[in-house]
Amino acid sequence: MVNPSAPPVSSAQTNDFPTAVGADPFRLSVLSLGSHRTMTVATTTLSHDSNNANTLPFTVGDRVLVSKGSKRGHLSTLHLEDVRDYLAKLAEKQEPIDIERSLDQLHVSFADGYMTGQLMSPKGLDPEKYVFSTNGAAQTAKEVLPSGFFKGLKQQAQFNEQGAKLATINWAFFANQYDNPRLLRTLRTRCADGEVRRMIRSCHSQGYGVYGNLQFVQDMLDNAGEFRELPVVDFRVTDSVMRLRFVEGEPNLHEPVQMYEAWNSEVGRRRVGLRGGMWQLDCTNGMGHWNDKTEYNWIHRGEAERIQRGVKDAFLNLRTTASGVVNAYTEAMNVSIDNAFQWLEEQMQRRGASAHRIEAAKQGMTHETSNPGLNLASAVDGITLIAQNDSDLLEQYELERMAADLLHRSLNKARSNGGRLYAEA
């Protein structure tokens, strides 16, 4: 197992994902167990072990497994068949297996820096120990533990050896009362100590409809008609989600083009989805439509035929949606803003953005890839630019939604205000 005296993996190591592009996911130095948290314990009778607390990985954090496509100012595309072939190789390495068991038959243990699980059999515990992804641990804990209990249990488990034993006992107390069958999704992954182990990546009800990334891509190839030939300019897979971006037309610098975006999550973090928007080559910024109702989403329930039937019609309808976003952005280039930095700060504060992100977006307005002139288009660019710097695809999605909403509402206001926008103060 892990050496208790080993130093923690730094955030720079765990987030240095660009070096992983095109590599065998079982040979990446970045595939580390990482969920380092600051631990605060107010009062306790346990003695604190400084060699063990907060230095070891606990669960496998969300990692970027694939990042392929265009970089800023450089067009690089894939065909959808290339995406399918890469996903097939990934699945061959990971060997995904789904297991249906009640959670009272899953023995969860906290020791040696890992949260692990072992399945029970009539002969006792199976010898294979499963590690947990951060997502898998949270979903399983939600089924077993009282609300909010897992946070304290993790602190207890990482405090010292005695705390880990008590955390194991506490989990078992609640799990022994849970005999409802659940679907556990597992695959093989390389851990921080170099060992390849099977990982519990998610936990679902038996009604959950399994629909994989590879199947989604194959269904698009089989059912999307002419749209299957669109170039893929961005292909990303993390432990939680997959996102593909297609473009229509020839991307040129400083010219937005229509984009189609495909999403899926094999672990319950997002629905299967298609949406339209715009994309730019010079900054690789993307943005979907401001109206969520224009998206096509399919929940993980029922049969895959529903998605297969809907793919082609979705692409056809999203062509109009994507065109609308491109036209709105083009119009925004001519909307001037008095005191643009203060205006953007006010707008992002209203939408709940943190001070750090607001400052980054203000700097992004004057980035070399942003639209010049401190106008509405450059304000949108500032937000979508910082979205690209976030390795969490779901966080990117939320930032880009914020940018689309800002574009739509501000355009409406500018049209009734002589094509200008003003800061309040």
Image (tube, rainbow, N blue to C red):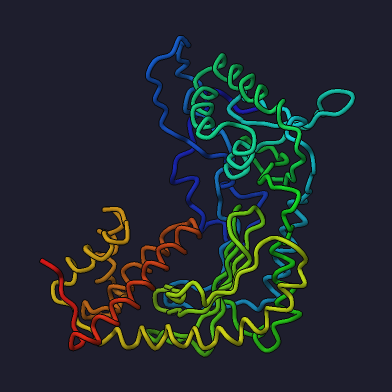
Look at 39% across and 25% down and name the residue there.
40
Q: Which x, y percent locates residue 178?
A: 71, 31
Q: Is residue 420 above or below residue 180?
A: below
Q: Which x, y percent locates residue 78?
A: 62, 76
The quadrant of the image that shows the C terminus is bottom left
Q: Is residue 310 above or below residue 10?
A: below
The quadrant of the image that shows the N terminus is top right
Given the current orientation, which residue lies at the most extreme right position? 122
Residue in the foreground of this view, choosing between 319 and 127: 319
Q: How many marks?
A: 0
Q: In terms of image quadrants, where is residue 22?
A: bottom right
The reply to whether residue 364 is visible in this rendering is yes
Look at 68% across and 44% down and name the residue there.
203
Q: Which x, y percent locates residue 343?
A: 19, 69
Q: Is residue 349 above or below residue 197?
A: below
Q: In terms of image quadrants, where is residue 67?
A: bottom right
Residue in the foreground of this view, choosing between 4 and 150: 150
Given the current orientation, which residue lies at the most extreme left position? 425
The reply to whether residue 238 is visible in this rendering is no
Look at 31% across and 88% down and name the residue there.
331
Look at 26% across and 71% down and name the residue there.
365
Q: Which x, y percent locates residue 391?
A: 47, 57
Q: Is residue 405 left or right of residue 237?
A: left
Residue in the foreground of this view, choosing between 74 and 424: 424
